[in-house]
Image (spheres, rainbow, N blue to C red):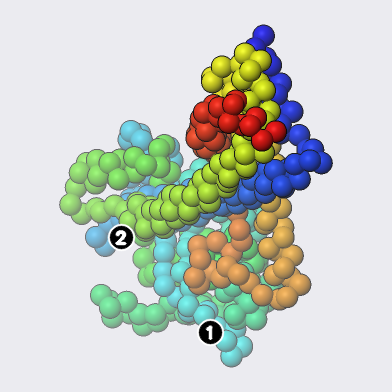
Amino acid sequence: MKSSLAFFIGLRYTGVKRSSRSVSFLAGVSITGLAVGISLLLLVLSVMNGFDRDLKERILGLVPQAAIYHRSKIEDWQSLQKDVRQMPGVEAASPFIRLNALINHGKATAAVLLYGFDPHAEKDVSLINDYVSEEVQRRILEDEPVILLGKNVAQSLGVEEGEKIMLVVPSSRTTSRSPRLAYFEVAQVIESKTELDATLALTSLQQAANLTGTPERVSGLRLKITNLFEAPSVMYRIGVTLGSNYYTSNWTRTHWNLYQAIQMSKNLVGLLMLLIVAIAAFNVVSTLVLVVVDKQGDIAILRTLGLNTRQIMAIFMVQGIVIGFWGVLLGIAIGCLLSLGIQDFVALVESVFNIQFLKSDVYPLTYLPTEIRLSDIASVTFTALGMSLIATIYPAWKASRVQPADALRYE
């Protein structure tokens, strides 16, 4: 019964009273500080989670998760494709041809990475087909002279769908062949909202092979790995199996620094935001200290009525936990709303002021991705409530040390 009384009194002290405007104000400040810190922490974590997700799903869905190359070029790639598919850790394999090329349209020229691909095999290893319409896929399968350009490439050339471009493949250092020219129709402009939009060009496997001088060979096989983080060990085993004429690559060589940068940024920025939450949580100390000073007469009366030191401490700890609870609740609600709306808000600002915050030549993505994870919400909630609980210990202890005779002397 006395425990219930301590809980009830703690809740009453948390309420607003006209005689304790300063206490109520500080309680509101503490709740607001917690809410702001927690909402910013959740927003930062959601943005970092978004970058982490889109690195794995979007960027690594367009660039090879892993690839096999030959010292010259792969001739009997059909047999190699069949053998690689049966190796542990490999889900699928698809042939590709990669060329450095120049595209000319009017007076504009742009350097691109030209990929020749087979839509049937590519759908099992990447997301490229998700960006290509069914009609364009049909034209690619029929080996028509069509090309797909990244959005930034098309903008720099001033070219639109349906127009013709001239593509030049420079001569190779290892061969004496002259540069090869070809004319393509721009069948589609691709907007992946990644760094690839600035360099990507796609055509059929056969059209790209015709530009190499060795139509029966491909540059390599790109693979889809069952577990992304096992890619280095899987590719090492494949390299040992195939022999010294082959060499392999995987995403940890091309994008590992980006992944590490995202993880490090998430940890560092999360730590900074957590310190803000800690500062806000310990504002509860000043609030409760003022409550203790303001309620010394009440504390003395409660002591004379039989409440012991533990129950007096419980009263003020309940008050601090209630302040922390409302701060956490508001912070999570605001943080989730900010996380859900930040992408649209940034896009609106970019369109209104005609600016771009994330450019493809600097950042891997041209938009601000977010992903709210329940694990982050749970960890932030328990951490903030734990800090609020710790912050109540000292004021509650001070309250329990109040002597009734001293407190009531001047009442």
The mark tally for this picture is 2
Among the two numbered marks 1 and 2 on one chain, the one whose residue lies closer to the N terminus: 2
- List the residue tagged with mark 2: 73
Quarter of the image where the C terminus is located: top right
- Asked whether 393 or 379 is in front, the reply is 393
Identify the residue shown where x is 63% and y is 18%. Answer: 304
- Find residue 192 and report its image quarter: bottom right
Q: Amino acid at mark 2?
A: Lys
Where is residue 75? Give x, y as percent. 32, 55
Q: Secondary structure at mark 2?
A: strand
Q: Secondary structure at mark 1?
A: strand
- Find residue 105 and report its image quarter: bottom right
Where is residue 60? Give x, y as percent. 47, 51
- Asked whether 233 or 13 is in front, the reply is 13
Q: Amino acid at mark 1?
A: Thr
Identify the residue shown where x is 41% and y is 69%. Answer: 99
Disc marking residue 40: none
Where is residue 361? Give x, y as percent. 50, 72
Q: Could you tell me how far apart the alpha carbons at marks 1 and 2 are, in whole angstroms?
A: 28 Å
Identify the residue shown where x is 37% and y is 49%. Answer: 66
Query: As displayed, is residue 158 above or below residue 72?
Result: below
- Find residue 34 and report its image quarter: top right
- List the residue tagged with mark 1: 109
